[in-house]
Image (spheres, rainbow, N blue to C red):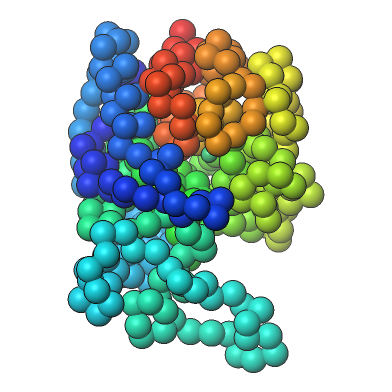
Amino acid sequence: MKVVYTPAHLLHNPSVEIEKSTTHSPFENISRAEKIREVLSADTAFDFISPTQWGTAPINAVHDPGLLRFLTTAWSDYQRDVGAAPEVVPDMFYRPAQRRGMSQGQEPDSVTGKLGWWCFETTTPLTSGTYEAARGAVDTALTATQLVLSGDKYSYGLCRPPGHHATSSLYGGYCFFNNAAIAAHHIATTTGTKVAVLDVDYHHGNGTQEIFYDREDVLYVSLHGDPNRAYPYYLGHADETGTGKGARCNFNVPLPARTDDDAYLLALEPALEKIIKHGAQTIIVSLGLDTFITDPICDLSVTTDGFRRCGSAIAQLGLPTIVLQEGGYDVAKLGDNVQAWLHGLSA
Ligand SMILES: [Zn+2]
């Protein structure tokens, strides 16, 4: 299986994260992708290639072009207008309720105002190289997608930063551009075939759901920690099933704490049935390994062998599958877990 990787991710290297009312070194850090690279590059089953460049059009096809415009210069604008700051984070967030009964707000002129306009939370700092790293992750996803469109049965894009929390017009949750959504939109619009995004990250992919919520060409299916206790809190409930043409094209499976391998595999079954019923010709997996039993920020109990079984269950569908990296924060085991998952898929 080909692995698409770029060292551009090293350019996004924040030293602090504001989370749980404190600051700490970021859970989402460069060692995650480097650990995966280390393990897969020592395994002869995987061949590494570099991404090709896809430009900005595929990003603007999914996101509000203002998001990309903002991220292109936000960090340097902040240094110039506000002052030197290695990590740039909003002080205030635009929320529509602030303007209840008034016209909708508009993007402010100042960089501080723009930050709260385009970002939805505090754990996702901008650094000097963030934009370049985020562009590299999109190129990685699209290059992995092209491999499958050109005939490979499977491919793996080692995307970092991840993408599934980025909505059409907001970044956050460690995500800037929605790599999986950009890839899914690319397949749906260039081939005219249906696509399924299967999101197995611990966290609900609120961004991917929002982007495709009213579309029938891209099915979104997610297994995740119940939002009643888990980030992103406001989305991921079972009654969010799509709207308009996208009615019944969104399928959420919220899971209780400590869900183990057998229970997880059981919960995966109806999700896979949805994919078949939808008529998807291609699957994009948003692969998060933060469902792992010792993940430091999550509470499910999936094991390394459980990941192998998940990959194997998805292979049973017999569909071309593009696997894109999302979360996973037990760095010591992250490489082994990705390896096990991909071996389950391609065995
Ligand atoms: Zn996650």
Which residue, as the protein is rendered here, is positioned at the far bottom?
102
Is 158 placed left or right of 207 in the picture?
left
Q: Position of residue 317 (x, y in %)?
A: 59, 20
Name the image quarter holding residue 1: top left
Q: Is residue 82 above or below residue 345?
A: below
| Front position in the image: 77 or 64 | 77
**Image-quadrant location for residue 223:** top right
Q: Position of residue 128 (x, y in %)?
A: 22, 58
Residue at screen point 22% across, 47% down: 11
Residue sticking out furthest to the front: 22
Q: Is residue 178 above or below residue 117?
A: above
**Residue sitting at x 59%, y 21%:** 293
Q: Is residue 168 visible?
A: no
- Closest to the observer: 85 or 201? 85
Residue 296 in view of the camera? yes
Q: In screen coordinates, is 347 left or right of 254? A: left
Front residue (pair 280, 14): 14
Above or below: residue 4 compared with residue 310: below
Measured as percent of width and height from the top left, residue 275 is found at 64, 33
Q: Residue at x 45, y 71 (%)?
A: 91
Q: Quadrant of residue 44?
A: top left
Q: Count how many numbered circles sit on residues in the image.
A: 0
Q: Is residue 123 left or right of residue 216?
A: left
Q: Residue furthest right?
A: 239
Q: Nearer the viewer, residue 95 or 309?
A: 95
* Placement of 145 over or under 23, stated as above or below: above
